[in-house]
Image (cartoon, rainbow, N blue to C red):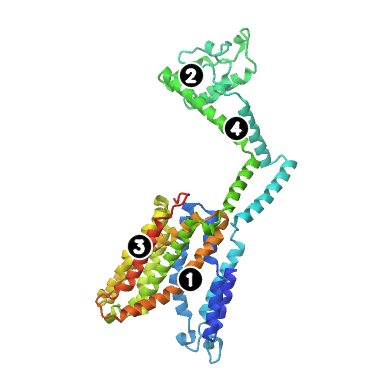
Amino acid sequence: MSNISSLLSVLGFGMSTTYLSALLLRLSGGFCNFTFGCLKSMIGESMDLPTQALALGYLSLSWGFGTILGPSLGGALAQPCQAYGSGFPLCKPGQLFETRPFLLPCLSAAFISFLALQSSIFLMKETLPSKLANKYARLGQTDEEQGSSTHEGKAVKTSEAGSELSDLSAAPAKKPSRQVRRGDSAEEMHSAEPGKWSSVAATIDELSPMAGTVGIELVQTLVTMSASQSTEPSIEQAPTAAVVPSGQQDNLQDAISASGSSQADQDAQMHESDSEHAVLLADSKELQSHGPSEQKQSRQEAAAVDRQRVWYKERQVQLTILGYGSIAFLYNFVDELTPLFAAAPPAIGGVGLLASQLAVPLVFCGVVLMWYAIYGYPWFQRNYGAGFSCRVGLLVTAPTVLLIPVAHYFSWSVVAAQLALCVILGLKSMGAANAFSGSMILVNNASPKHAFGKVNGCGQMVASFVRAIGPAGAGLVWGGTAQLQLAGKQFMPFAVVTAVALLTQLLYVFVKLPVPDK
């Protein structure tokens, strides 16, 4: 729906001939566009926290790429008849591009929306938990029907695994009554006396680590011995029992000597083996006690508890949405304020850059954003968590935006002013990546699983509202301060952004989530 809305609204915008029609079409396009909220919801529904950080990095990458490509493509295609002359197609008097000078860039945007629509239809998979639960329930029923009529594939493996678990739980966790000790002769190893080698099968697993030293042939010989002794032999049967060849007896004794330097070491190894056997037996009983039906019931109970949570009444959800909206406001405000400051004449505290000259630091800012979003932020979030990353981003932003007006003092040289803005805006981009990505992860972390869409939709509504008032607020504040007769007045509008960043950072101190954010 969002891609269809964008496609139709941008086409209508390009065809508009009056300001009112253009305004209504843009309003309808924004009102029906849920792309960003849907993406954040899908990320929260389908990924763990480290993967969310990487996914949001790719989202920032695409955003940075769009901020570079979008203005370039729009500027190159807008008003083609004026830019390229009447020889350009459909630029004769009365023709389409002559009467609709902004239609061509809108057609390009509509084509991009069309490609996004195709990818969402044919490539994107549903992540909504309720839809997935119904799908898996149907698949489970199909597998059950197949399992009742065939003994192939997974059904056979499942039944065999169940049988092994049953055998393991039924077998007594009996300690072998005697270990192999140094000095044991072949006659002692094959003695029929109970308590010696009558339970060779029980000790095969403990002898298997010796295979690399003794040789696999010897271990296989012991396995053959255990298989041949299906019943405990009597004294008379002892002479006919399988024996270890004399040439391998010395090897066995050497391996036993190398396996432990003292009797205490061997007893410790035996105790460890008993412990592992007990843990394995406990695990098997635990697995048996939680069959598919019990696991399904457990998941259903967890989902029922999650559905009882009223998302808009939870304090942590409220705080994370408010924090996300505040971050959207401050970065939108400074993004609108920076071009006004850069284009203003130096006499009123600006830099006096042309639009083409300002493009250099803006492009550099987009490149830094793309690099940091892929390589910097995921590492930061993985090691320090989303909450800490968000607060660090805000703390970096607070002083950085106050450095932007310093470029006024380099207005004597275009290159010097551009270099100063490149460094400052690059730092701001890294702070923005931390703050934005961290705040979006925290919104998903605070939200009940069944309400990802509602919570992200509410967050996006708040962000859209502050983005609507941000440009107007930036223009009013800059225009008001420009009329003051004060030295350093260009710092005053940026001080507003610094104050909002510090207050937002303070707000995130009170965000305490039950789930770890790294």
Residue identifier under label 3: 502
Sequence-first tag of 1 and 3:
1
Q: Where is residue 59 in the image (x, y as percent from the top left)?
A: 48, 62
Cβ–Cβ under 8 Å for marks 2 and 3: no
- Residue 465 is marked as 1
Q: Where is residue 53 in the image (x, y as percent from the top left)?
A: 46, 56
Q: Position of residue 206 (x, y in %)?
A: 51, 24
For label 3, count other residues whose C-alpha is less than 10 Å away and answer few (under 14), some (14-19) or many (20+).
some
Q: Position of residue 400 (x, y in %)?
A: 32, 65
Residue type at numbered disc 4: Lys
How many angstroms separate mark 2 from mark 4 (CA)?
Answer: 36 Å
How many angstroms separate mark 2 from mark 3 (CA)?
Answer: 73 Å
How many angstroms separate mark 2 from mark 1 (CA)?
Answer: 80 Å
Sequence-first tag of 2 and 3:
2
Residue type at numbered disc 2: Leu
- Observer-nearest of 339 and 505: 505
Residue identifier under label 2: 252
Residue identifier under label 4: 285
Q: Which of marks 2 and 4 is in front?
A: 4
Residue 107 is drawn in which quadrant? bottom right
For label 2, count other residues whose C-alpha is less than 10 Å away and answer few (under 14), some (14-19) or many (20+).
many
Q: What element carries label 1?
A: helix
Q: In this view, does 168 lie above or below 295?
A: above
Q: What element carries label 2?
A: helix
